[in-house]
Image (cartoon, rainbow, N blue to C red):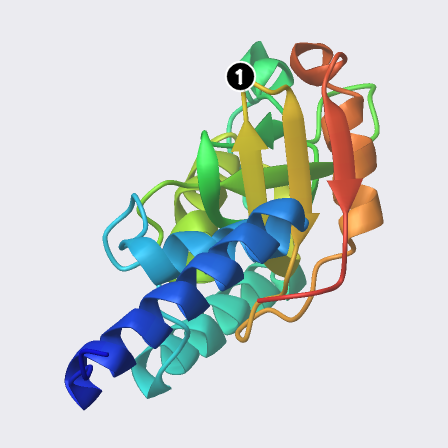
Amino acid sequence: MRAVHPPVLVAVILSITLTVQSFSLLQAGPVAKIKLRAMTQNDESTGEQCTTNAEDQEAVTKLKSRLESNSAGTPTSNPEPSESWRNLPCVSIDEGAHKYVLIEAETPSVTGEAGECRTFVVSKRGASYHRNAAEPMIDILEKHQFRNIQVTGGGRILLEDDEKKISIFGYSYGFGKADHAVSKRVIESDDRYKDFEVTWSDAGY
């Protein structure tokens, strides 16, 4: 019987192990799909594998402080807001698996109309950190004179348009874990996703 070189044998064993792991992950849920993607290739968006670092934590702290300061400050005498804020979608999620944030904000003050709390679910392709998903939406809300803006948490959203599935899971180091049940309700209330199967889990990052 022909002898098998140890390096060849090791390579064969590793190949079999990876195949078994990949098959198991394919049979599992959305969190496992992300793990499989990470095993085989980089994510679609640059830096998606980033978790957090001191620089990101400092930036998150500054963002939170700024939002808190704006909420506690004296209301500015801005002109009456245009009606365009009413057309802002509460759901803005990109195809694929990306970091997401849950944002709460009070609608602009309009003469004869009290402000109300509105909740936004935002995922963004290319967001290395959760703050990168939050900041563009915060800028839009501030431009439309929303008040008391808060990022209440984060996680990840896997949007599969072809399969009409949306999976919500994980957490954010900077903002904490979003209430995924709330995110699910917000997404399901959007007519664009009324035929989608929306699920959530606290597992994974």
The structure residue drawn at horizontal position 65% and vertical position 33%, both measured from the top left corner, is 166
What is the three-letter code of the residue carrying label 1? Asp
Q: Quadrant of residue 32?
A: bottom right
Say if 89 sits above or below 10 in the image. Answer: above
- In this picture, residue 74 sits left or right of residue 135: right
- In this picture, residue 44 sits left or right of residue 150: left
Say if 83 sits above or below 7 in the image. Answer: above
Say if 205 sits above or below 137 in the image. Answer: below
Nearer-the-camera pick, 138 or 9? 9
Q: Quadrant of residue 105?
A: top right
Residue 103 visible in rendering: no
Nearer-the-camera pick, 10 or 155? 10
- In this picture, residue 30 sits left or right of residue 141: right
Where does label 1 land, which residue? 162
Kindly give the residue lying farthest to the front in the view shown: 1
Q: Quadrant of residue 117?
A: top right
Q: Secondary structure at mark 1?
A: loop
- In this picture, residue 177 sits left or right of residue 66: right
Residue 12 visible in rendering: yes
Nearer-the-camera pick, 99 or 71? 99
> Residue 129 in the image: x percent, y percent?
39, 62
Callout 1: 10 Å neighbours few (<14), some, many (20+)?
few
Say if 165 sits above or below 22 in the image. Answer: above
> Residue 160 in the image: x percent, y percent?
54, 28
Point out the image quarter for the N terminus: bottom left
> Residue 39 in the image: x percent, y percent?
37, 62
Point out the image quarter for the C terminus: bottom right
Number of callouts: 1
The structure residue drawn at horizontal position 27% and vertical position 59%, both measured from the top left corner, is 47
